[in-house]
Image (cartoon, helix red, strand yellow):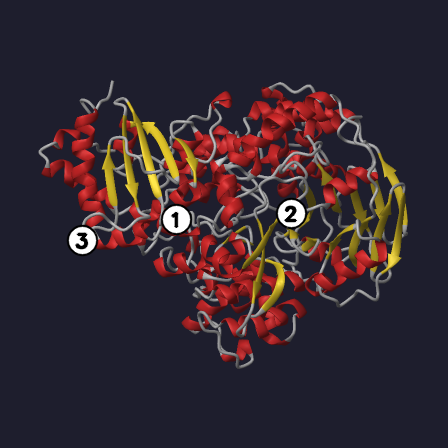
C-alpha cells in the first residue's frame, strides 16, 4: 500500500490489548481516508445502541492518504466517535503535528474501545504500542500535561491530550495537540475521558513514507506551494491570522453579537479584528506541520487582569465566541479566555456560545439566581467568565457549572420554557461564528451537516463567500449571499467536497487555491488510488451519504436537519436587517437533489446501491427493492 | 469593448468626479486615510491607471487623500488590475471582490491584506457611485441587480 501504511492499531483499553486491523486497499480507495474511512469503520464496528461514554463506544483517529508529505495543509487528522454532546455521529479535524508523526510511526489510524481501569496514556513507539499509567497527569491542565509527556517521551514526541473537562466528561470537551491544535468540536475530549485515556503519545519515528509516485508528489509540492503561499486567503491568514478579516465580516453580517441578537457592531469589529490582535499582542506566528501559511498566533498580554505569558493565541472562532458573542470588545480578555478554555480542554465555540446563551437567559429572567447560585451573569463581564464560569464548567461544579457543562441545548432543556429558542445550534451542536443571516447558504449547510451546525464539514462557507471556484465540476455560480438562489445546487457539491477535504485531511485554508483535479492528482501520486475526477467526487458523496445513514441508526431523522429559531430570525441590524432566510425551500430542494427521504433523512435505496453501499441500503431499507 | 466607458478619458472623468466626493467624505475619508498606503488601480478595456495616495499628506485641504488620474511616478504599496467594466459594477456593490480574485478576474500584488482592510471602509461609497453618475447626467450607466 502507498501513501497509507495499511496498518491500523485496534486498541482495547479494557483488556489492555493491541491488535492489527488491516482493511482492504479498495476500502481506502472508496472512502479516501480520514473522516470517510472513520465513518466506514464506525458503520462496520459500532454498537449503535451504546452510549457515547460507554466502554463499547468507539474512538477512531484516522489519517488521510497525504499525511506526512511536505505540502501545506496536507497533514491534518480526523477523529470519529458518537458525540457525547449531540448523540449523533461526531467528527472533528485537527492540524498540528500528530498526523505525520503517526504516519511515520507506521500507522494510518487508531481504533480505541473499552475503558482503562485507571488513568492511562497510549504510547506509540514504532511497532510497540503500550498502555501506561497516567495517574500523575490526571487533573492537570493540557499545557502542563503536554510538557510532562514531552519530558517523558522525548523532545520530538508529540501528543494528543485532554484536560480536566475531558476527564469530567463535559460533553464539549476537546483534545489538543501541542496545547495549540484542537479536535475542537463534538466532545472528543469526553470520548477519551470516558475511556480513562488522558493522552496518546507518538515518539519520534521518522520512518520513510512509501509513496506511489514520489517524483510526482515532489513535482506537485514544488508547483503548488508558491500558489498556496501567494493566495489572497493565505496572505491574510499569514499577516493577521484567521481573524484577519473579522472587521470585513462584521460589515457583511457574518459576525454574531450578544448571543446572535445582533450581527453588527462596528466598534467590536475594529477592536477584535486580526490586525488589532497583531498590533497589540502578537509575539510571533506558528504553523502546523510543513505549512507555508503560518496562520497560528503566539500572543502575550503584558499587564492588567487578563495578563498571560507568551503562548497560543486565539483563532477567529475563539475571538468571536469569547468576544462579540459575549458582548465584549476586550481583546486581552478574549486571549485569556481562549487560553484558559484550551488548558481546561473545552471547545471554545461551545463554551462561549453556552455562556452567551446563559447571559441572555439571565437578562430575560429565565435563568435566575437560584440556577446560578447567586452569581450574576452580565454581558461583557469577562473576569467572571475567566475566573469563575469556565473553571466551574470544566469541573461541573456548583449548580451553574453543572448546568452549563451540558452545552447550550442541554442547559436550555434543563431550565425549560422558551429558552431553547434562543440557543444557536443544530442537532445540539453550537453554531460556529458565521451568521447564516449574512450568508443564507450557511443555514442549509449547518442544518444538513451530519455532525450538527458546522461550517467546515462541507465547503459551503468558502463557496458562498467566493473563495473558491471549481469550473471542472460545474461550480461556476456567482452566488448572492442574501438569497437562497442556487444554494441547494451548491450544497450538493459542497457536501462531496467537504467530505473529500476531511477524508484526505486537507486544511480548508491551504487547499483553497487547489483545483479539484489537483487534489485528485495529489491523492493519486501519494496513494495510487487512480482516481479520475468523477471517482473522487463519488467517494466524497459516498462518505457524506454513509454519515447520514449512521446518524439515522443513531436516531436522527429529516426533522433533525434543522436549526434553532434564533439562527433564522431576521437580523435586526446592519445590511442584513429584516431579510428572511428561506430555509425550508432550500432544504426541500436539497433533499430532492440528493434523493433524501423526507422522513428518514437518508438517501434512497437506489442511490445507496448505486454508490456501492448495498449492505448499508439493506440495513436502512430492509426488505425493499 | 467596454459597456460603460467610451475610452480612458471618459473613465477618468467619471472616477475623478466620484473620487472627489469619496476622499472629501468625512466618514469614509477618515477611515481610508488610516490605511496609510498608496494603491494603484490598473484597468483594462479601456486601459487606464488611477493611483490613490493615502500615505502622504493630502495635496488639497479638506481631502483625506490624493488621487492621480493616469500614470504617475508614485511607487505603489499595492496594485490591483481588472477590467474597467468589472470595477464599474464593483462600485455599485454588485461584484464580490474575493470571488473576482478567486476567478482570476482581478489580479493583485503588494500589500494586498492592507487593501483588503479597506473593503468594509469603502462600502458606503457603493451608494455614492450611482449618485455621482446621476449628477453627471449619466443615469444610463447606472447598473441594477
| Badge 2 element | strand
Q: Nearer the viewer, residue A260 or A248?
A: A248
**Dot in front, 3 or 1:** 3
Q: Quadrant of the C terminus of chain A?
A: top right
Q: Which mark is residue A90?
A: 2
Judging from the image, mark 2 belongs to the subunit labelled A
Q: Nearer the viewer, mark 3 or mark 2?
A: 3
Please give the name of the residue rendered at 55% of the width and 63% of the height, measured from the top-left corner: A335
Element assignment for label 3? loop
- From the image, tell me which residue sits under label 3: B62
**Left of A418 or right of it: where is A621?**
right
Q: In which image quadrant can residue A176 be found?
A: bottom right
Task: Please name whichever residue, A401 or B64, is drawn nearer the observer in this view of the structure.
Answer: B64
Q: In the image, residue A609 lies at what x, y percent?
A: 64, 24
Question: Please, is residue B29 above or below residue B73 in the view?
Answer: below
**Separation of residues labelled 3 and 1 (CA atoms):** 27 Å
Question: Quick check: A618 left or right of A358?
Answer: right
Which label is found at residue A266? none
- The location of residue A572, given as percent across then percent down, is 32, 56
Mark 3 and mark 2: span between their CA atoms? Answer: 58 Å
| Mark 3 belongs to chain | B
Task: Mark 3: give few (<14), some (14-19) or many (20+) Cα within 10 Å.
Answer: few
Amino acid at each position: 500500500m502507498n501513501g497509507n501504511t495499511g496498518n491500523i492499531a485496534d486498541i482495547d483499553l479494557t483488556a489492555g490489548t493491541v491488535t492489527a486491523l488491516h482493511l482492504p486497499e479498495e476500502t481506502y480507495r472508496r472512502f479516501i481516508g480520514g473522516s470517510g474511512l472513520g465513518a466506514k469503520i464506525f458503520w462496520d464496528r459500532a454498537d449503535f445502541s451504546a452510549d457515547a461514554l460507554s466502554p463499547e463506544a468507539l474512538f477512531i483517529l484516522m489519517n488521510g492518504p497525504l499525511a506526512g508529505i511536505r505540502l501545506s495543509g496536507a497533514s491534518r487528522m480526523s477523529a470519529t466517535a458518537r458525540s457525547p454532546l449531540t448523540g449523533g455521529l461526531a467528527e472533528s479535524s485537527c492540524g498540528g503535528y500528530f498526523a505525520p508523526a503517526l504516519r511515520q510511526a507506521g500507522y494510518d489510524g487508531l481504533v480505541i474501545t473499552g475503558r482503562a481501569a485507571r488513568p492511562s496514556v497510549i504510547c506509540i513507539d514504532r511497532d510497540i504500542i503500550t498502555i501506561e499509567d497516567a495517574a500523575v497527569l490526571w487533573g492537570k491542565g493540557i499545557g502542563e500535561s503536554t510538557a510532562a509527556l514531552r519530558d517523558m517521551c522525548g523532545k520530538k514526541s508529540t501528543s494528543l491530550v485532554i484536560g480536566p473537562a475531558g476527564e469530567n466528561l463535559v460533553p464539549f470537551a476537546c483534545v489538543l495537540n501541542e496545547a495549540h491544535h484542537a479536535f475542537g468540536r463534538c466532545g472528543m475530549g469526553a470520548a477519551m475521558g470516558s475511556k480513562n485515556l488522558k493522552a496518546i503519545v507518538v515518539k519520534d519515528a521518522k520512518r520513510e513514507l512509501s509513496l506511489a509516485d514520489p517524483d510526482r508528489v515532489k513535482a506537485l509540492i514544488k508547483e503548488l506551494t508558491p500558489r498556496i503561499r501567494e493566495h489572497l486567503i493565505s496572505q491574510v491568514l499569514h499577516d493577521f491570522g484567521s481573524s484577519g478579516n473579522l472587521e470585513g465580516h462584521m460589515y457583511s453580517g457574518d459576525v454574531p453579537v450578544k448571543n446572535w441578537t445582533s450581527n453588527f457592531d462596528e466598534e467590536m469589529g475594529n477592536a477584535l479584528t486580526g490586525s488589532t490582535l497583531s498590533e497589540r499582542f502578537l509575539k510571533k506566528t506558528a504553523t502546523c506541520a510543513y505549512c507555508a501559511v503560518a496562520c497560528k498566533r503566539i500572543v502575550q498580554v503584558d499587564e492588567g487582569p487578563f495578563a498571560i505569558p507568551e503562548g497560543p493565541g486565539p483563532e477567529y472562532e475563539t475571538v468571536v465566541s469569547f468576544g462579540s458573542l459575549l458582548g465584549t470588545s476586550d481583546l486581552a480578555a478574549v486571549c485569556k479566555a481562549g487560553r484558559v478554555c484550551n488548558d481546561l480542554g473545552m471547545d471554545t465555540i461551545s463554551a462561549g456560545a453556552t455562556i452567551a446563551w446563559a447571559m441572555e437567559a439571565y437578562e430575560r429572567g429565565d435563568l435566575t439566581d437560584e440556577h446560578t447560585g447567586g452569581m450574576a451573569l452580565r454581558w461583557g463581564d469577562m473576569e467572571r467568565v475567566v475566573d469563575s464560569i469556565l473553571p466551574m464548567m470544566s469541573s461541573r461544579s456548583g449548580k451553574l457549572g453543572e448546568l452549563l457543562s451540558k452545552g447550550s441545548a442541554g442547559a436550555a432543556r434543563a431550565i425549560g420554557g422558551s429558552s431553547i429558542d434562543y440557543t444557536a445550534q443544530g442537532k445540539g451542536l453550537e453554531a460556529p461564528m458565521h451568521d447564516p443571516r449574512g450568508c443564507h447558504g450557511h443555514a442549509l449547510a449547518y442544518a444538513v451537516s451530519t455532525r450538527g451546525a458546522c461550517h467546515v464539514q462541507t465547503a459551503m462557507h468558502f463557496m458562498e463567500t467566493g473563495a473558491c471556484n471549481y469550473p471542472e465540476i460545474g461550480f461556476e455560480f456567482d452566488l448572492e449571499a442574501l438569497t437562497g438562489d442556487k444554494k441547494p445546487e451548491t450544497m450538493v457539491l459542497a457536501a462531496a467536497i467537504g467530505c473529500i477535504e476531511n477524508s484526505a485531511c486537507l486544511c480548508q485554508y491551504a487547499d483553497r487555491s487547489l483545483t479539484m483535479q489537483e487534489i485528485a492528482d495529489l491523492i493519486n501520486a501519494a496513494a495510487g488510488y487512480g482516481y479520475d475526477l468523477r471517482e473522487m467526487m463519488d467517494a466524497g458523496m459516498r462518505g457524506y451519504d454513509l454519515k447520514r445513514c449512521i446518524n439515522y441508526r443513531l436516531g436522527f431523522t429529516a426533522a433533525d436537519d434543522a436549526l434553532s429559531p434564533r439562527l433564522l430570525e431576521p437580523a435586526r441590524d446592519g445590511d442584513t436587517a429584516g431579510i428572511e432566510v428561506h430555509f425550508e425551500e432550500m432544504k426541500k430542494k436539497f433533499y430532492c437533489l440528493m434523493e433524501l427521504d423526507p422522513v428518514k433523512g437518508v438517501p434512497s435505496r437506489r442511490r445507496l446501491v448505486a454508490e456501492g453501499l448495498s449492505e448499508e441500503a439493506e440495513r436502512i431499507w430492509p426488505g425493499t427493492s | 469593448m467596454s459597456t460603460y466607458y467610451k475610452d480612458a478619458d471618459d473613465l477618468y472623468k467619471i472616477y475623478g468626479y466620484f473620487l472627489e466626493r469619496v476622499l472629501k467624505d468625512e466618514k469614509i475619508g477618515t477611515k481610508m486615510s488610516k490605511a496609510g498606503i498608496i494603491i494603484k488601480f490598473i484597468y483594462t478595456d479601456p486601459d487606464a491607471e488611477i493611483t490613490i495616495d493615502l500615505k502622504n499628506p493630502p495635496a488639497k485641504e479638506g481631502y483625506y487623500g490624493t488621487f492621480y488620474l493616469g500614470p504617475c511616478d508614485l511607487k505603489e504599496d499595492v496594485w490591483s488590475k481588472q477590467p474597467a467594466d468589472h470595477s464599474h459594477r464593483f462600485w455599485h456593490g454588485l461584484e464580490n471582490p474575493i470571488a473576482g480574485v478567486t476567478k482570476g478576474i482581478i489580479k493583485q500584488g503588494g500589500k494586498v491584506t492592507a487593501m483588503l482592510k479597506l473593503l468594509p471602509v469603502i462600502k458606503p461609497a457603493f451608494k455614492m457611485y450611482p449618485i455621482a453618475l446621476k449628477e453627471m447626467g449619466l443615469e444610463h450607466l447606472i447598473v441594477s441587480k
